[in-house]
Amino acid sequence: NQEKAAAILDAWQRKFAAEVRKMTQSEAVSSSYSFYPFSTSTLNDILGKFSELSLKNIILGYMFMLIYVAVTLMQWRDPVRSQAGVGIAGVLLLSISVAAGLGFCALLGIPFNASSTQIVPFLALGLGVQDMFLLTHTYVEQSGDVPREERTGLVLKKSGLSVLLASLCNVMAFLAAALLPIPALRVFSLQAAILLLFNLGSMLLVFPAMISLDLRRRSAARADLLCCLMPENPLPTRVKKVNERNRTRGGKNDKNAWKDTSRQPLDPDVAHDEANKTCCLSLSLTKWARNHYAPFIMRPSVKVTSMLALIAVIIASIWGATKVKDGLDLTDIVPENTDEYEFLYRQEKYFGFYSMYAVTQGDFEYPTNQKLLYEYHDQFVRIPNIIKNDNGGLTKFWLSLFRDWLLDLQAAFDKEVASGCITQEYWCKNASDEAILGYKLMVQTGHVDNPIDKSLVSSDTKNGHRLVDKDGIINPKAFYNYLSAWATNDPLAYGASQGNLKPQPKRWTHLPTDVDLKIPKSSPLIYTQLPFYLAGLSDTESIKNLIMQVRDLCIKFEAKGLSNFPSGIPFLFWEQYLYLRTSLLLALACALAAVFVAVMVLLLNVWAAVLVTLALATLVLQLLGMMAVLGVKLSAVPAVLLVLAIGRGVHFTVHLSLGFVTSIGCKRRRASLALESVLAPVLHG
């Protein structure tokens, strides 16, 4: 069956590649030559290997993230205020959320590919950690006079909306990227969107509970990561302020007022509310933003210079965006340092050779529309990249080879009829095999109820019955009877035609001694292929031109009733570029519109939504300009990254906008407070 045949073919290809590799490593082969075996089986094996989930890489990546979070949130001189424990717990929570999200994707039937296993887990972790940094930063910046039971709620009050808005914008950006017509990247975008929703739920529902537990540890003055150890020194007591009316009665001080004290442990945060908190905090990004960066950025000269620089960058980016070229090399999807990579690299560099098929399908009457099929085939001669024969024409396809075989049999039959070896009723023993086969074909009527008619045999070579008429058209009535005979008795031509006829013609083997004249009739064809070979395709532009020319030809004959389409590697990998820019613009527009609506609804501020949207559009434009500077070509992967850049840019713009909108004071003070509140978590994230 086909499954076993495919398994045998795959095994043979792997063995072939192994044998070539073994021969090239032997001493008999000159070192001046390089041999690179290539087969679809070994290529699929390599791609499949890199598509497998690498637990080692994931564990190493997550361990690195754990170490980074612990070091970043650790305060060595003040272990009570240190947040390494809650940071590690947050990373572990995100890891569980990512695993749950991937499992949910599997339940939904979303397939996994290389991006799903190698990129999505780390991307989801990185995006989730940024939200965690924002929550922990808000947590540590709280003043000590806030009641302990209200602190977790205050953290969510200050940063929950920012986390929700940024995460939703990221999800919308991923969903917008799914509009790009590339199945593998669409799967990647959907999986990333689902994982971000799981991360959002864990950050807003579970992580606040971890903050509450850490708050109990800090209230008990227990060290971070060593909370099981009791504090060495007894905690000071807090002196409560009494009501002014209790302190002064009739203008005199109450002597017993100072005795109104509390024996509850003093919250360690109260002791650090003054300027002298810790050495680590004094050198933190927050204090640097408040004391240095914000005053610097608010200077009028800096504002003017920044705006002029932004205008210059935008103009340069617009110019660079017009210079970005489309491109995708096959070597970009194959791991380096492999024979397959070297083969594809040298094939593209020196040859630019590919094969393609023009596929015909559907309810097309091949016997009665042979002229249209010949015309369809001949039109490909106008495409310059198709290899022609020595006469400037095209190589023959299955129908022309079928016709030539029938013409040869007709010539042999006519010769035997002229010599008297074949008559209308019988053939002589000395008749040739080709002539006898021609006789059997001549008597076919094509009718199931009356399949044989010897009266069709005629010695009139001009006006009599012929297998192929003078216009080169095969007898339509017995077309499928002839097809059964040709596919079985001329296997070399049938195989060389690469017609891949579906359904396969019925088998009928010709024996000169067999007097049974009936030839089985094959089923009507619903699928055929016309092979062509392509050359001179060294860059994306030439391949795009080829695709457009072939597509125009296919559309032309589609209108004539011939259902057809092209197939081959150029159409599989490069056809995306015909509509990639249109799809990219649509995805970017959808992502920006989604961000605008989300910001406007959640912040209730149209002007803030406009500024955020313009900032994100400028960011995408700058990325396009940098692509031109760095020589990065536009393909499906950069297109998805451009859309995702909108989601990533939301973390910088939305947090800053929310901090500005919710602050009190003049514009200068509000901008300074916004920078102070978001600089550290944004940089760490």
Image (tube, rainbow, N blue to C red):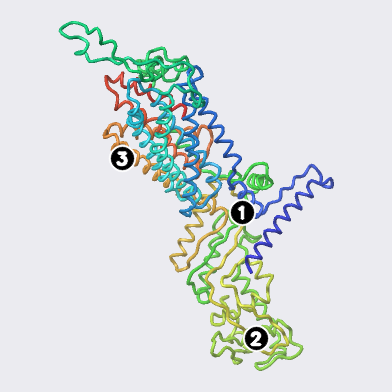
Q: Is residue 197 visible?
A: yes
Residue sticking out furthest to the right: 28
Give the vertical position of 587 relative to 567 (above or below).
above
Task: Write down the quadrant of residue 62 in the picture.
Answer: top right
Q: Which residue is mark 2?
A: 440
Residue sticking out furthest to the left: 250
Depth check: give the residue in front, 101 or 636.
Answer: 101
Which residue sits at x=17%, y=6%?
Answer: 251
Query: Which percent across, then down, holds residue 411?
Result: 67, 80
Give whichever of discs 3 and 2 has the lower sequence position: 2
The quadrant of the image that shows the N terminus is bottom right
Give whichever of discs 2 and 1 has the lower sequence position: 1
Q: Which residue is mark 3?
A: 597
Depth check: give the residue in front, 28 or 512.
Answer: 28
**Of the residues shown, which amino acid type is indicated by label 2?**
Lys
What is the CA distance from the residue labelled 3 to the residue labelled 2? 76 Å
Give the vertical position of 509 relative to 583 (above or below).
below
**How many residues crowd around disc 1 within 10 Å: few (fewer than 14), some, or many (20 or more)?**
some
Which residue sits at x=44%, y=36%?
Answer: 645
What is the CA distance from the residue labelled 1 to the residue labelled 3? 47 Å
Query: Which percent across, then down, holds residue 390?
Result: 66, 60
What is the CA distance from the residue labelled 2 to the residue labelled 1? 41 Å
Q: Which residue is mark 1?
A: 354
